[in-house]
Amino acid sequence: MTKPPLTLYLAAPRGFCAGVDRAIKIVELALQKWGAPVYVRHEIVHNKFVVDDLRAKGAVFVEELDDCPDDRPVIFSAHGVPKAVPAEAARREMLFVDATCPLVSKVHIEAERHHENGLQIVMIGHAGHPETIGTMGQLPEGEVLLVETVADVALLDVRDPERLAFVTQTTLSVDDTADIVAALQARFPAIKGPHKEDICYATTNRQEAVKAMAPRADAMLVVGAPNSSNSKRLVEVGARAGCAYSQLVQRATDIDWRALDGIRSIGITAGASAPEILVDEVIDALKARYDVTIETIETAKENVEFKVPRVMREPAGA
Ligand code: SF4
């Protein structure tokens, strides 16, 4: 039987970012250096495939430091942790390595700097996301107020409208965040903040590639996890940029083939925590059903790389 033709647009950049790459490397190096088990507080990055792979190598994933023994190394995930977490690990004299992405740490430093200057902080982010919890946890309770939407801005009850600053989660929708920043600036003209927001290069680049790809595609698949903020944003960006059907899939087995019935083109991208092997799996599944022609839609080139912490570069016992 002849397969129907399908143009497959492949977004570039897509998939792993420098922060995710570094965090995974830290766990792998820790396992090599100290042997198993190495504890990891929270999923090192939001991807089941990555987590399962590291678990098979000897990583133990826990949600809280209380679940870790004192005498094994523990790694903090790429999303960042509240200040109380490393403080508690130090108090228990644990060996810990912080795999927080340097771009998240930059936001932590920004928030602290504003706090030292006597400003109250407004954080634009998603309630309950580990990055938001980590950033808010850099400062004492009440010093960081969270807004998730433009509507939340009107409800803010601030200490002094003249002494405010904002920071953002790194993995938000660029467009939604611009609207929230505009609402903050309209209500609090004196509010200080970064030039635009704190959304990282990887989130911005992946959203830009989707915006270029989505209007050309009958459907779009985003390879990523349901708890991955930047992956979920790619689905929304795709839908808003004109793609009629935009779906998040963890693996090829999640593809809803019935929903793809009759399509002639499809866009594929992947969130910053999704490995390329899963993109290949999805492409192979499409090739099994369609006569696929691949076209890459490249909107940026990335060459960002973050060094692992010095302790991971030193030999064991150093
Ligand atoms: S998505 Fe951005 S902030 Fe998050 S780990 Fe990757 S580079 Fe860092």
Image: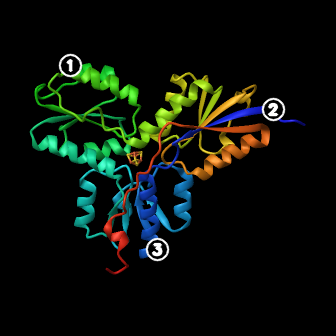
* Quadrant assignment, res 178: top left
Q: Residue furthest bottom?
A: 317
Mark 3 or 1, nearer chain start: 3
Name the amino acid, label 3.
Gln
Q: Nearer the viewer, residue 14 or 104?
A: 14
Mark 3 lies on a secondary structure that is helix
Which is nearer the eye, 133 or 276? 276
**Distance of mark 3 from mark 1, alpha carbons?**
52 Å
Residue 272 in the image: state x and y as whole percent.
Answer: 48, 45
Circle nearer the viewer, 2 or 3? 2
Can residue 185 be spotted in the picture?
A: yes
Which quadrant, please, contains the C terminus? bottom left
Q: Is residue 184 above or below residue 318?
A: above
Read off the residue under disc 1: 187
Task: Assess disc 2: are there few (<14), some (14-19) or many (≥20) residues with their C-alpha within 10 Å of its C-alpha.
Answer: few
Sooner in the amino-acid sequence: mark 1 or mark 2 = 2
Marks 3 and 1 close (CB-CB < 8 Å):
no
Name the residue carrying label 2: 4
| Image coords of residue 94 (percent x, y) | 30, 69
Q: Which residue is mark 3?
A: 32
Left or right: residue 67 versus residue 244 is: left
